[in-house]
Image (spheres, rainbow, N blue to C red):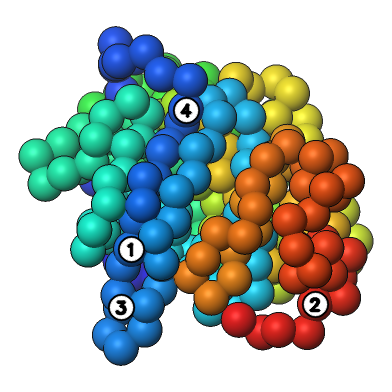
Amino acid sequence: MWQGTVWWLRFQPAVAHHPMTEYAAELTNVSLTRGDVLALDKVSLRLPIGRTTAVLGRSGSGKSTLIQLIIGLLLPDSGSVSTLGESLGPGNLISIRKRIGYAIQDIALLPHMRVRENIVLPAVLSGWAGEDKAARLAELTDLMHLPGSVLDRYPHELSGGQQQRAGLCRAMMLRPEMLLLDEPFSGLDTMTRRSIHAQFIELRERVPISIVLVTHDPDEAIRLADDIAVMRRGQLQQSGPVGDVLANPANDYVRDLCTGLAEDTA
C-alpha cells in the first residue's frame, strides 16, 4: 500500500505530445522473477488505446505484477515494456508516470486529511491554481456521484463505496491518459459494487481514457471491459475482445474461468 501511495504522490500534470500509437501499453516477451517465483513467463500483450482491458486471473496469476510493469514500479528481467508509446527505462519512468492514474484495492486515502484534501492533493503538488482545483473537484465528484457533504469528512467516516469513489476521483484529478485499477472494487458488498460498476460504466462513456482493470471476478471483467487478458501462473492464456474470448476460449482453463468454474487458484 505504502509503495503505491508514494508513487502516486509523484504525479504531475501531463502534456500530450507523445509518439502516436494504437496501444496504451505493449509487453513483448516479458519475464520477471520475484524472489523464487517466476511471476511472469514470456508474456506478450497489447492493450488497445482508448479501451478498457480487464486482466483476469486467480490470486498469484501475475495480473498485479503485469500492471506494475506497465506503470514502471517493476522492470522486467527480460523482454520490453512500452507504455503510452514510450519504451520504459530508468530515464523516462517519472515522465510516463505523470500520465497515468493509479488506484488499488486499499485505496490509501491519507487518514489525517479530509476527503477534499485527499482528492485535490495531486493538483496541490502540481501547483494548480485554487479555482482550477475547485473546478476539477466539482467535475469529478459529479462524475463519480460523490456527495458534497462527505468532502469535509475524514476517510474513516466514509463508507467503503464512498472511499472507492474518492480514490477514483483522486486518480483522475490530473486528467491522466491511462487509468490502472488493481482490484478496486474488491471487499465491497454486492449492492455497493453494483452501484460503483454503474458509475464506472458512466465514466468510460464520458471520459476518453485507456483503462486497465485487474480483477479475479469474471462477471466484473465481462460487464466492465471491452477486452480481456486471461492470466494463469504467470502466463498469458488468451487476450482479445470480450465477445471473442467468450465465444472461442483458447483452452479449458479460459472457458472455465470465464464461466466461474475454474478451481485452479493460481
Q: Position of residue 258 (x, y in %)?
A: 82, 61
Distance Cα–Cα, label 1 vs label 3: 10 Å
Determine contact: label 2, label 3, CB under 8 Å.
no
Distance Cα–Cα, label 2 vs label 3: 25 Å
Indicate the secondary structure of the residue bearing disc 2: loop
Q: Which mark is residue 262?
A: 2
Q: Position of residue 8 (x, y in %)?
A: 33, 50
Indicate the secondary structure of the residue bearing disc 4: strand
| Residue on which disc 1 sits | 31
Distance Cα–Cα, label 4 vs label 2: 30 Å
- At x 28% / y 85%, what residue is drawn? 35
Instruction: Give, as a three-letter code, the residue at label 2.
Output: Ala
Indicate the secondary structure of the residue bearing disc 3: strand
Q: Position of residue 40 (x, y in %)?
A: 41, 67
Indicate the secondary structure of the residue bearing disc 1: strand
Q: Nearer the viewer, residue 66 or 251?
A: 251
Q: Which mark is residue 23?
A: 4
| Residue on which disc 3 sits | 34
N-terminal of the two: label 4 or label 2?
Answer: 4
Distance Cα–Cα, label 3 vs label 4: 27 Å
* Residue 20 in sight: yes
